[in-house]
Image (cartoon, rainbow, N blue to C red):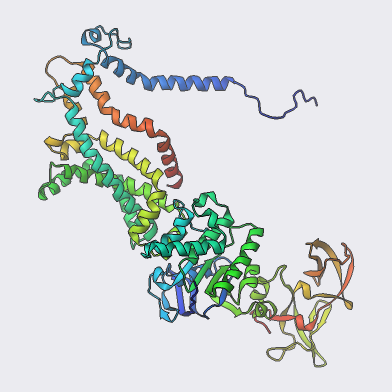
Amino acid sequence: MSAAVNPQGRRPQHLTPGRIGLYAFLAITAAFFLTPLYIMVVTSLKAMPEIRGGNMLALPAHVTFDAWVKAWSGACTGLTCRGIQVGFWNSVRILVPSVVVSIAVGAVTGYALSFWRPRGAGLLFGLLMAVAFVPYQVFIYPLVRLFSLGGMNNSLAAIVTVHTMFGLPTMTLIFRNHFASLPIELFKAARVDGAGFWRIFSAIMLPMAVPIIVVAMILQVTGIWNDFILGLVFAGRENLPMTVQLNNIVNTTQGEREYNVDMAATLLTALVPLVVYFVSGRWFVRGIAAGAVKG
Amino acid sequence: MSHTSDVSLRGVEIGYGPVRVLDRFDLEIKASEFVVLLGPSGCGKSTLLNAIAGLADIDAGEIWIGGRNVTWAEPKDRGIAMVFQSYALYPRMSVRGNMSFGLKVAGMPRAEIDKRVREAAEMLRITEYLDRKPSELSGGQRQRVAIGRALVRDAGVFLLDEPLSNLDAQLRTELRIEIKLLHQRLGATMIYVTHDQIEAMTLADRIAVMKDRRIQQLGTPHDIYFHPANRFVASFVGAPKMNFLPGRLSLSGGVPVFRTGDVIISLEGYAFAASPLEGAQVELGIRPEHIAPGPDGQNVVVDLVEPVGSDIYAWSTLAGVQLCIRLPAETRVVRGDVLPVIFPVHRINLFDAASGDHL
């Protein structure tokens, strides 16, 4: 036995071939997924003559923000040429109430299911989960009929209702799982203290659900912002969301195709979810992982 | 802060679907009494406590607190306060917030809330932590806060659900004494659930030993320890456990004796509940500290010596059964020693081998 090195203290770090391979793979994957974004950004910063030159990957010779300005305030969607900003504000008007209402309804439902356990709670939750797997396109026609029966088709109220409904299974699931992971004795203590359904929810459970609320917000903001078909069908012509406007800009068949404007408009549309991910990615991963373990 | 209520459980039945938890359960608890529900896990003692608190529904029977039938009353309307095993402190509130939450919900004036919180905090010596969050406290401090939250409610009955089980051994002893002092000071009724027989023995005015959906014995700690009603109670209470020797009764010349193998133990003077039957299958129970070393006793060989400081436990074998003998700490005994021991008849408990009932 010859102990050349006496192991003591901190373990030495070695860069093994396996490690190098791993990093190389990661770098290639990152480049693969970033390339489209890169092309979009550089294209949006070029003028049309330069784009016609045909080198997609080249950096812009002359950086110009004209395309962004036009996309925001001057591009034509159908007959009006007021850019994508109309859609942006429509999307915000759909997004804010939809996110707030769907999270509120999901949180209360999850809370009631996990703590108050009304008769048939298990069945209700099972049904909710089963419905989550039905493709939502199936519901569109019946919903349109229902809304027009109630006289609220093509309105902000209709689209907010639809987003709340389709968000309910996921929202209920993540809140139920979160609340189910809390000790039941907390709930019992609050009941002995005399707090009722809403008091326990607002004073004790909601403050403990902040990380889950952040996750729910990320899910709902991206989901609702990126929605196309529901906005197109239910929102009405006055409230068409940004995604629908984007489609109208990009898919015009007349005249010259302004790639730089298309790219700028697309980037503008994708900006909100992108920002949400960058700001709160850490929370998102944490919440998903928590859900996975508990699910 | 002192008022107190009696508690009366009349024919209470609890079940989860087809699973019975409690069968026709009766228990009368006097005002200011300290009653401990003692039993192994799954005996229904925590469920019973939840039922008294109104946190679990009962299938049949009545619950009376302070002369009122509260069977269907909400937890807050029962005049109870509760302390939980996991403390159940509201994590986002300060200690002060935790203690005042119930009073705020009840709409009590601010000045009165402050006064009560201050008094309870002083009593429990947690005044300096009032503005901390529960996560910044140690286990013992958290449990003090949980007790404080119960104290401010000024309830007639305190329900304590294994409040010391999450603490380490030393803290458990300290808080045990504090709980007893608190009871003496407040004079409130306390119902305390535990599976720890030392806690039960030290705290209780009366202990209800529970198993299999029923009370096996209800009595003072002294009764439970020295006159167990059946073999289960005898074996559950006491550490190390009571020794049990299986054997049979016989009457030699009118004097009852216990025989196991070639060992004969005289039962002359034993207070039989009914006249003993010749040849009856019984178990003889005797606690380790009641087996006395004596000059003309049974000879047993010491297999193992366990010094625990205050005492020495000598383990040996008699008629094929392990026997624990508790000896004074200064006794000199090593493995292999032959020890003559006697079994004093007034310390012996006989149990029917089949039913386990005390004879």
State the residue at coordinates (17%, 45%).
A157
State the residue at coordinates (71%, 91%).
B275
Residue B178 image offset from top left, x and y in percent: 61, 66
Residue B122 occupies which quadrant of the picture? bottom right
Front residue of A15 and B130: B130
Front residue of B84 and B138: B138
Q: Residue furthest bottom?
A: B254
Which quadrant: the N terminus of chain A? top right
Q: Is residue B264 visible?
A: yes
Residue A56 occupies which quadrant of the picture? top left
Residue A79 occupies which quadrant of the picture? top left
Q: Is residue A153 left or right of residue B73?
A: left
Compared with residue B164, is residue B21 higher up or lower down, i.e. above or below?
below
State the residue at coordinates (46%, 44%).
A293
Compared with residue B160, is residue A284 higher up or lower down, i.e. above or below?
above
- Total marks placed: 0
Residue A189 image offset from top left, x and y in percent: 45, 62
Residue B357 image offset from top left, x and y in percent: 65, 81
Q: Residue furthest left?
A: A79
Q: Is residue A168 left or right of residue A177?
A: left
Residue B177 image offset from top left, x and y in percent: 63, 67
Q: Is residue B334 left or right of residue B354?
A: right
Q: Is residue A259 visible?
A: no
Compared with residue A100, is residue B338 higher up or lower down, i.e. above or below?
below
